[in-house]
Image: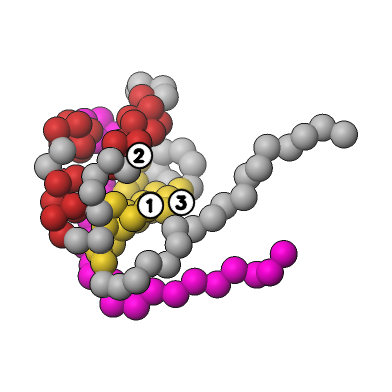
Amino acid sequence: MSEQPDTTVVPTPAHEPPYYAVVFTSVRRDDDEPGAYERTAARLSRLVRQIPGFLGEDFAHSPGPGGLAVSVAYFRHLAGLERWRDHPEHLDAKQHGRDRWYERYTIHIARVEHSHAFARAA
């Protein structure tokens, strides 16, 4: 019997409000740099975890050019969110995204007033 990798998807846990959610929705262009976007996204995902007040992130996408991607990052306070917004590597990636990777994107920042979770018992 072959072992299958664990592909369980687990959303970011509910946190005690209030906190902030940054919702980034994007539509990608055709990538002329195979793998560059994915490498950059992985690097940024590691970096954001070092920001004080970062609580977690969720991501979902439709693969390929023209597909919709939704990324939600959660921060305990605005100071952490602003620190991430101004991080030099994040700023470089945003500029590169506007220049090369995105057809369009939208950013929404919201204060979370209520949060709860559900998980079916195993």
Label 1: few (<14), some or many (≥20) within 10 Å? some
Q: Measured along the vertical axis of the image, is residue 22 above or below residue 93?
A: below
- Whether residue 38 sits left or right of residue 20 in the image: it is right
Q: CA distance from mark 3 to mark 1?
A: 10 Å
In magenta, the rendered stretch is 95-122
Q: CA distance from mark 1 to mark 2?
A: 8 Å
- Residue 109 in picture, x, y percent from top left: 21, 62
Q: CA distance from mark 3 to mark 2?
A: 14 Å
| Residue drawn at point x = 13 percent, y = 51 percent | 82
Labelled pair 1, 2 in contact (Cβ < 8 Å): yes
Which quadrant of the view contains residue 107? bottom left
Label 2: few (<14), some or many (≥20) within 10 Å? some
- Residue 16 in picture, x, y percent from top left: 34, 71
Disc 3 versus disc 2: nearer the observer = 2
Tell whether position 48 is magenta. Answer: no
* Residue 37 appears in the figure: no
Q: Which quadrant: the N terminus?
A: top right
Label 3: few (<14), some or many (≥20) within 10 Å? few
Residue type marked 2? Ser
Q: Secondary structure at mark 1?
A: strand
Labelled pair 3, 1 in contact (Cβ < 8 Å): no
Residue type marked 3? Ala
- Whether residue 86 sits left or right of residue 108 in the image: it is left
Q: Earlier in the sequence, mark 1 or mark 2?
A: 2
Q: Measured along the vertical axis of the image, is residue 112 above or below residue 23?
A: below
Q: Secondary structure at mark 3?
A: strand
**Circle 1 residue:** 57
Q: Secondary structure at mark 2?
A: helix
Task: In this rendered view, identify the residue nearer to me: 33 or 51.
Answer: 51
Disc 3 versus disc 1: nearer the observer = 1
**Circle 3 residue:** 60
Labelled pair 3, 2 in contact (Cβ < 8 Å): no
